[in-house]
Image: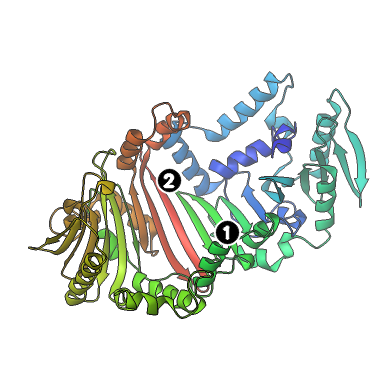
Amino acid sequence: MPALVKLRLVLPVLLAAVVALLVAGCGGGGSDSSSGADPASVMPTGAPVYLDFTVRPEGETKTNIEALATSIAGVDDLGELIIDELEQSASEDGEEFDYEKEVEPWLGEKGGLFLREYVEGDFEGVGAAIQVSDEGEAQDFLEKQVGSDSEPAKKGSYEGADFWVEAEDGTTLGVFDGLIVLAEDEATFKSMVDASEGDNLSENEDFTSAVANVPDESAADVFVDIGGLIEEAGNEIDSETQLFLDTVGIEPKEATAVASLIPGSDNVEIDVSTNLSGDNPPSGDASELLGSLPATSVGAFASAEFGKRFNESIDKIDANGLPGQVPPHQLKAGLKEAGIDLESIAGSIGDVGVFVEGNSERNLTGAVVLDAEDATQAKNTVSNIGLFLRGTGTPGITAINGKASGFSIRSPELGRQPLVVIAKGERIAIGYGLESAMASLQEAGETLSDSPAYKEAVSALGSTPITAYVDGPAALKLASALVPSDEEGFKEAKPYLTKVDYLALGSEASGDLAVAKLIVGVGK
């Protein structure tokens, strides 16, 4: 998008819109608007990525944004800060600019930006549109901007829409249909004019159905035509990836996704919905397992009905085979001959959880936790795994008895701790070190569900089951120990990361869509 950033017009308008997109937007991704046309109405249907946002925050959204700006960056008036920065930037370039007089009178509510052609790792054919409340005022502003260039812009007209092409880089701008339109080049501008005649995103069924359920309080939305992106990249999906996608029933070339940004007073929420998961999106609720993991976890994740889905995947792989490796209908039979009954193992597993503990590389540990249908299945599954490993001659295996039964494996490759596989009650734990494995079996100590931050995360997700959790301060401490001290990006981000209390991810199925919520809790 470098060409857009160069625009003198974009200094007061597009930069404000981009800031709005990132931290200060309001409104949602629907097609309603009180000023000007819907920006999506000039976006070509072939654009695989489209962003929409509202430039002027109001009401509760504005209040929430200001609260976040104060909490995260210590900024009391974000809008005033943005305008001051824009005016100062223009002044430094030798161009006096007064936002209140020159832009505010005509600036509308919504904006949009599309990325079309993906060529050699970058997008070409970029265009943007922002609503205007007064086309005449916007036109006057444009004429003033292009007229101040040392080398005059070329003026033209296409299908009744006047435009200017800047001499420096070919950026093309114009006003039509209640929108101020910016394009990377003249051809892209003309494609937007053509789109306004009817073949545009706002009338595209894939787009309208994808954004139909965008939350009203969304600050900004990103629509991605996943199939379109794959096509732009040359339809390149390697055979192994394609096999995996076929196995789980995913057809990416038909998929779309929408992400929405929702500011709260003490958190930022990102909602994602997609049909990428196929006809049977993940469902279930593993929050009980997640909440039972140790309170000292830096991060934890849980997946519902893992055994069932694992079994379904194995069935599909067995039916199709592995090209050049295993013929169809031979995988499960071959493994049974080797003493591995995948169906039996998968059938004994319900939900699965994972957690990580520690604040440095030296004391980093964690475990995988599996819920079995009953205690007998849990014990038998661990026993069968141990027998199989002994049968293959795996060295370093030692039996474990007592409160939990199982075995441990020691080897130089594993480092200072053994890999421990144990069962107790209806749970199986595979941990790096006995302590982590035992902690996952609820032997003692507080759990995540006892943590105030975790409770806040669950509350913020509402009815959406929590599937993953990260403790902000603990994660930052671990990252500080692992990331090189001279890493500039981390050093710059660290003052803001100290404000993060937690990250929480929730997911569920909604019809044929997979829906996820990411909540970033921000401390006061």
| Tag shown at residue 268 | none
Please state the horizontal and vertical placement of residue 275, each as a whole percent of the image: 56, 67
Residue 156 location (% of width, % of height):
92, 41
Quarter of the image with the C terminus is top left
* Earlier residue among tags 2 and 1: 1
Q: Residue furthest left?
A: 402
Residue 168 visible somewhere in the drawing: yes
Is label 2 in a helix, a strand or a loop?
loop
Q: Residue at x 21, y 76 (%)?
A: 377
Query: Seen in the image, is 425 located left or right of residue 312?
Result: left
Query: At label 2, which amino acid type do we have?
Result: Ser
> Number of labelled discs?
2
The kind of secondary structure element at disc 1 is strand
Q: Nearer the viewer, mark 2 or mark 1?
A: 1
- Is the residue 130 above or below the residue 42 in the image? above
Color encoding of the figure: rainbow
Q: Nearer the viewer, residue 247 or 103?
A: 247
Q: Which residue is mark 2?
A: 265
Where is residue 144? Give x, y as percent.
Answer: 83, 30
Question: Foreground residue, 120 or 186?
Answer: 120
Residue found 51% across the figure and 66% down from its top? 244
Mark 1 lies on residue: 258
In-image side of 369 versus 81 (left or right): left
Q: What's the amino acid at mark 1?
A: Val
Q: Residue furthest front?
A: 393
Q: Is residue 45 left or right of residue 406?
A: right
- Residue at 69 percent of width and 57 percent of height: 234
Q: In the rendered image, is residue 32 in sight?
A: no
Label 2 crowd bin: few (<14), some (14–19), many (20+), radius 10 Å: some
Q: Quadrant of residue 265?
A: top left
